[in-house]
Amino acid sequence: MGQEDIVFQEVDEQLEAEQLTRFLRQNGKWIIVGFVIFFAGLVAYVLWGEHRTRQDQAISDLYVSAGQAMAGKRWDVAEANLKKLLADHARHGYSSLARLQLARVLVETGRSGEALRQLETLVAEAGDMTPFRDAALMQAAWIAADVDVGQARSHLARISAESSFRVMALELDGVMILQEPDGGKERALAKFRQALDTRPAPPEGIRQRLLRRVERLGGPVPADQTPVNQIPARDEG
């Protein structure tokens, strides 16, 4: 590199340094503010993530503890944990499951009316979350079937036709028909056969129960179904 090139390079470097100095003098405080905002946001993001992790763990612990209490039939402990979860974390994903479990606890402790109110709340909250909504409607129908058949059928009618709970809804409707004074055998058989014909096919346990119901009512067992006499007898009601 010649001496002339060295001189030009030094001049360029001085100009660049002066431009950088002028830029920093004019915009330095905004650059610093930008860095502060960036790092503050990064710290807030990390802290929020840690908070959510701790919160999720606390909610999970409450739900698991409630499940363990239910398994041991310690209904008061289960109810306390589930109500705390719903009170403190009403919008969390676990809240729908917690409300379903709370309804079961209330039924087990003789408070069917409260259980139905919890399930109606879940139906309203579920919105487009069809599985939770239909699960709540199905559970509400089972509860209401013992006290108000009309209310039970109202719940069943709201279960979507494509729902995985449709089979159980048809079965329950058939059972309620059999409990009517005239004992509508043929209508009940039609409900049980309709449940057997749903697609996708019913789970094996429910399919066998439906086959037993059809056989007890004297109806023919479909040729493509497992012979009922090969299924262990059990009183299903």
Image (cartoon, grey):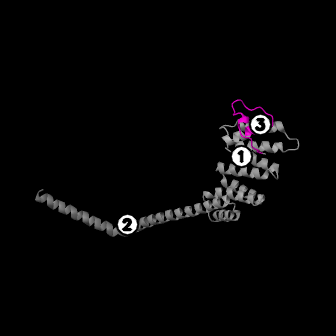
Figure disc tally? 3
How busy is the neighbourhood of tag 1: few (under 14 within 10 Å), some, or many (20 plus)? many
Report the front residue among 7 and 132.
132
Q: Where, quadrant-wise, is the N terminus in this rendering?
A: bottom left
Q: Residues within 10 Å of mark 2 (few under 14, many from 20)?
A: few
- Quickly name the residue at label 2: 31
Q: Earlier in the sequence, mark 3 or mark 2?
A: 2
In this rendering, position of residue 31 left or right of residue 11: right
- Which residue corresponds to mark 1? 159
Q: In the displayed structure, does residue 106 sit left or right of residue 35?
A: right
Give the crowd class for mark 3: few <14, some 14-19, many >=20 residues within 10 Å.
many
Q: Residue at x 62, y 60 (%)?
A: 63
Q: Is residue 222 magenta?
A: yes
User: What's the mark number on residue 214?
Assistant: 3
Magenta segment, which residues? Answer: 210-236
- Determine the CA span between mark 3 and mark 2: 79 Å
Q: Name the foreground residue: 57 vs 121.
A: 57
Label 1 to label 2: alpha-carbon separation: 59 Å
Q: Residue furthest right?
A: 181
The amino acid type, in three-letter code, at marker 3 is: Val
Q: Quadrant of residue 190?
A: top right
> Is residue 154 shown above or below 226?
below
Secondary structure under the numbered disc 3 in the rendered image: helix
Which of disc 1 and disc 3 is earlier in sequence?
Answer: 1
Query: In the rendering, at what x and y percent does residue 212 appear?
Result: 75, 38
